[in-house]
Image (spheres, helix red, strand yellow):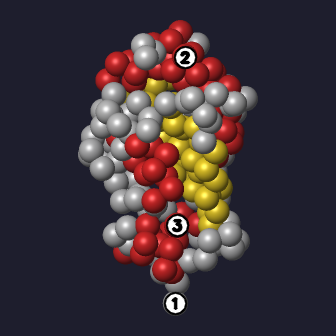
Amino acid sequence: MVKLAKDFRSFADLAAAYERDRDYRIVRMPRPGSDVAIVAPHGGSIEARTSDIARDMAGQEFNLYLFEGLLKAGNFAALHLSSHLLDEPSCLDLLRACRSVISVHGCGHAGEIVLMGGRDVALRESIGARLHAFGVTCEAAPAGLDAADPMNVCNRGRGGTGVQLEVSLELRRSPRRSLLVRAVREALLAAPV
């Protein structure tokens, strides 16, 4: 019987139903001296291309955490653990030391758009201003995608705030996604320490 992510209440529930390195993979790349983490909690085949975008954002400077679906089909239904339930221990351990957390997600909105949420208003506005300057459409995420919950993975850093980026499939597939990567990296590098 197939287990569905909507029925899970924690990462432990998911891990009891699916096998690591067969059904899903965890990539954790700490960068010594970095207090920024880039997270793709629904990477691999769960939300297409979010892992690639997160890797590009992290570069060699920022911590990286990916949870990636590896199933042949049905990754979203089986492995899409809601962001406020993602309590995988190595992820939380990485985030505890970070002042800033950016999570990269996929959304089903039409066109090339980024919906922005999370509790770090200043960083969100800094990224948004850069996106607008680059000609990339962005707007505030609606309720349900706004990552306002303190338990949302983007808000699990040491300051309790972060930014969630919901990226449309059209933008995830476009070469213009490099502008999103550039906007995030510039905002993070310009942020006060």
Provide residue 1's location: percent of width, then percent of height.
Answer: 52, 90
Can you identify the residue that label 3 sits on?
79
* Residue 90 drawn above or below residue 130: below
**In the rendered image, which quarter contains the C terminus?**
top left
- Hey, what amino acid is under mark 2? Leu
Mark 3 and mark 1 lie on one chain; the one further toward the N terminus is 1
* Residue 45 drawn above or below residue 3: above
Q: Are marks 2 and 1 in contact (CB under 8 Å)?
A: no
Residue at (52, 37) in percent of width and height: 37
Q: Picture quarter containing residue 176?
A: top right
- Hey, what amino acid is under mark 3? Leu
Can you identify the residue that label 2 sits on?
189
Provide residue 140's location: percent of width, then percent of height.
Answer: 35, 29
Can you identify the residue that label 1 sits on?
1
Residue at (43, 72) in percent of width and height: 12
Mark 2 and mark 3 lie on one chain; the one further toward the N terminus is 3
Label 1 crowd bin: few (<14), some (14–19), many (20+), radius 10 Å: few
For this orientation, the residue located farthest to the front is 32
Compared across the picture, whether 5 is left or right of 186 comes to left
Figure disc tally: 3
Q: Is residue 137 visible?
A: yes
CA distance for labels 3 and 1: 15 Å
- Hey, what amino acid is under mark 1? Met
Q: Nearer the viewer, mark 2 or mark 3?
A: 2
Secondary structure under badge 2? helix
Mark 2 and mark 1 lie on one chain; the one further toward the N terminus is 1
Secondary structure under badge 1? loop
For this orientation, the residue located farthest to the bottom is 1
Provide residue 166's location: percent of width, then percent of height.
Answer: 47, 39
